[in-house]
Amino acid sequence: MESHWNNRAFARFSLSLAVLLVAGCTSVIPEKRHSPAEIAGYTPQTFSSALATTVGEQQQREADIANIRAVFAQPIFAGAAANVSGALWSIGFLNTEKDGGRVLVLAALDYMQQTLTDVSTDTQRAVLSAAYTYYPLESATRLAGLLPKLNTPRQFAIAAYALLKAEDTVETRVVIESALGANGLDWTAEPRIEALRLRLRTDVAEVLAKRPPLLDLLRGTARPGRPVIYSLQRQDRQQVGLAVVRGADGRFVRNTDGQLFNIPHLAMALTNLPGTITNGNTPQGLFTIVGAGTATSKVIGPTPYLHSQIPVEAPIADYEHNPDHPKTEWTAQQYESYLPESWRNYAPFKEAFLAGRAGRDDMLIHGTTINADYYSGASFYPGTPSAGCLVAFETWDKTSGQGIKSDQLSLAKAFTKDGADRGYLVVVEIDDKLRAVALNEVLADILAAEKN
């Protein structure tokens, strides 16, 4: 299991919001599974969250900031490496203390260049991820020197992506390619490096221009007779996406007023790293959905999540909801067999398969109790980022903690409306526009898909 939500390095932050978030998408021990009939009877007011109240959120925030400042007061890595990881996550999660975080990251990178073996791979990941997300320009020189020394593919890939984010030039790509050959390791079949090499050798705009027709994807994927959630995203995940649901009968779900059901849907991780990387964005591709449950994470909240899984994480029998399927190993060809023919050779849509090979798991479809005001002014506001899951908007009474409005519950109801809780999820980037996805952009394709 991928450790990005239940990392032992966060033990000293056991009650912090950062840990609750980082425990959100992978340390999911279901307290309850929810049947379609139960979901149909729920309302937002069915659920409540102490963390969503003003008092609960403020107490937790104050504790987190105190933890961050305690790390700032300590010598870097002097017995506090685990706290560095937690502090860096809290800095991003609370969107605060960024100047202190910069000092911490640059000092940590200097230390890693001198004594990399003294730093755990999980702490390396936290430092490199923060460098990518918040400080790529300031970190670039240090990262270029560190890159050939990194001997784990995940850490190498994060550092490489940070360099590309700082300056995506031919020279930068040559530096990365050279470093790949310098460490003497054979990463030929490594999925994160495979994704990185694809990024180095292609142009994002050119790739998007070659995207197969969305209509083909909307007409059908996987096996017929199962409901499908389509989460339609931009290439820049800081733009809010859009979720619609195709029922088991092939028709897209409507609201009671006859309008097409749709909700805003954020597929952006706090790190905004690519989807094959731990804590990165939700990867593009075809997921399976295997029911609904309650998460233990307070930041996900009590609203039922939909349990989505990627290839490899889900055995083939579970993936296609066929218990009689022979116990065979996943292959690229097996994954492609679930896709429309026109999409089988489109590399970006194989990201979910690569992510599964890389060990990512438990990227759920869930709600949120996080105070969206942490991210006021961001393009994804009032959305709240996760650690790789798909997040629907929710609002809660600030005094009682009782639910007021829940797009997550609406999505769960739409998906299970016919009494089934097994189906599929499609995550796809439709273009690179810098605005939220609107229904009118995809409506013609959706209506056309229903006619076939």
Image (cartoon, rainbow, N blue to C red):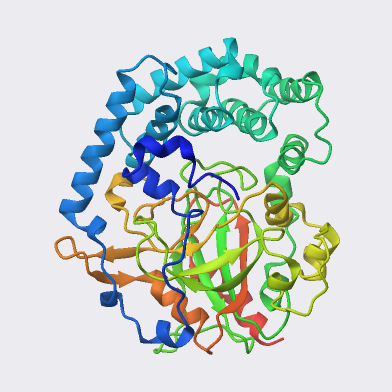
Q: Residue at x 25, y 71 (%)?
A: 404
Q: Residue at x 76, y 69 (%)?
A: 339
**Residue at far top of view:** 114
Q: Is residue 149 left or right of residue 38?
A: right
Choose between 395 and 214: the one closer to the eye.
395
Q: Is residue 417 left or right of residue 56?
A: right
Q: x%, y% of residue 215?
A: 69, 72
Q: Is residue 66 above or below residue 99?
A: below
Q: Is residue 260 above or below residue 334?
A: below
Q: Is residue 41 above or below residue 336?
A: below
Choose between 154 and 79: the one closer to the eye.
79
Q: How many marks?
A: 0
- Point out the image quarter for the C terminus: bottom right
The quadrant where residue 156 appears: top right
The quadrant where residue 70 appears: top left
Q: Residue at x 72, y 55 (%)?
A: 353
Q: x%, y% of residue 251?
A: 60, 86
Choose between 158 and 449: the one closer to the eye.
158
Query: Can residue 377 be seen at all in this image of the molecule?
Result: no
Q: x%, y% of residue 218?
A: 66, 74
Q: Is residue 230 left or right of residue 377?
A: right
Q: x%, y% of residue 415?
A: 52, 79
Query: Can residue 65 be seen at all in this image of the molecule?
Result: yes
